[in-house]
């Protein structure tokens, strides 16, 4: 970011960036802890994830208030305006990532006592690992204002879609093999959808970073993977 004659403006923009960085760190940890809780059927860890969510919500509200205040007082244009609006958009996506991690934690609390077919968690673990890499990469792209890295994240969204399709088929097989698995696997299906939605919010952030840097949007049609490509 270019320096401004009014140094307090620079300080305000830097504070926005720090809030986004803090939100990103919280969202990443929530997602990692939610997956660990699910993989180990750890209801206590899941409850900790749920308890962290209000902190992320509070930060998102802080970013909203700060962006409105800066726009009203500074009347920014061009790159400055893109930076401020971009921070607002990214904070909203990170808040939703936290909500999705919280949803996985809530499902974990419900199934923790069952412990059925632990091998069914494997596909979800793979989805989580990819989602975390993508989230980390896009947050790095934001920190470095790297449009090409953001675009690379955007292009990889199809991989997570394809993995969700594979998980769906696997869980469906488990349900058909034994009706007693239906409730457990249904909760896992919702968890896989949550992870796929994390990927969607990650690509939203990638689009925002790309726009902040270059002032132009990525294509409106995202690459799709798996069975969803034919939908």
Image: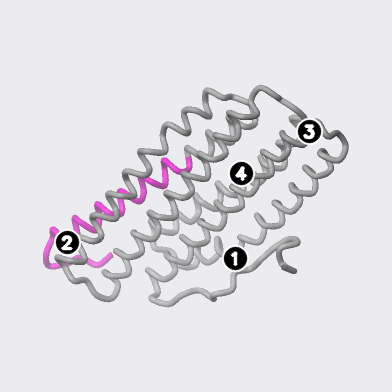
Per the model, the C-alpha gap separating discs 1 and 4 is 18 Å
Quickly name the residue at label 4: 128
**Looking at the rendering, which quadrant does residue 114 occupy?**
top right
Q: Quadrant of the N terminus?
A: bottom left
Task: Identify the mark nearer the N-term, 1 or 2.
Answer: 2
Q: Quadrant of the C terminus?
A: bottom right
State the image coordinates of residue 86 (x, y, percent, origin top left): 36, 64
Per the model, the C-alpha gap separating discs 3 and 2 is 57 Å
Q: Which mark is residue 181?
A: 3
Quickly name the residue at label 1: 155
Q: Please state which of residues 153 and 120 is positioned toward the viewer in this rendering.
A: 120
Magenta segment, which residues? 1-28
Nearer the observer, disc 1 or disc 4?
A: 4
Position of residue 167 in the picture relative to residue 176 (left or right):
left
Residue beneath the point at 55% across and 53% down: 134
Instruction: Tell me whether the residue at label 4 lies in contact with that at label 2, contact meaning CB atoms closer than 8 angstroms.
Output: no
Position of residue 205 in the picture relative to residue 180 (left or right):
left
Nearer the observer, disc 3 or disc 2?
A: 3
């Amino acid at each position: 970011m270019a320096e401004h004659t009014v140094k307090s403006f620079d300080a305000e923009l830097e504070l926005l960036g720090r809030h986004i960085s803090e939100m990103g760190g919280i969202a990443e940890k929530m997602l990692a802890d939610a997956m660990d809780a699910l993989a180990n059927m750890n209801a206590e860890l899941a409850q900790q994830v749920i308890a962290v969510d209000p902190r992320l919500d509070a930060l998102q509200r802080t970013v909203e208030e700060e962006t409105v205040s800066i726009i009203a007082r500074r009347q920014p244009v061009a790159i400055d305006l893109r930076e401020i609006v971009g921070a607002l958009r990214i904070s909203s996506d990170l808040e939703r990532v936290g909500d999705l991690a919280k949803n996985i934690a809530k499902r974990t609390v419900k199934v923790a006592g069952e412990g059925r077919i632990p091998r069914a968690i494997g596909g979800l673990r793979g989805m989580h690992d990819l989602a975390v890499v993508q989230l980390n990469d896009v947050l790095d792209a934001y920190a470095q204002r790297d449009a090409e890295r953001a675009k690379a994240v955007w292009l990889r969204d199809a991989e997570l879609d394809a993995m969700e399709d594979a998980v769906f088929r696997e869980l469906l097989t488990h349900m058909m093999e034994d009706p007693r698995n239906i409730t457990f696997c249904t909760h896992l299906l919702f968890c896989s959808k949550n992870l796929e939605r994390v990927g969607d919010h990650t690509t939203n952030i990638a689009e925002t970073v790309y726009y902040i840097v270059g002032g132009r949007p990525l294509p409106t049609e995202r690459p799709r993977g798996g069975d969803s490509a034919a939908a």
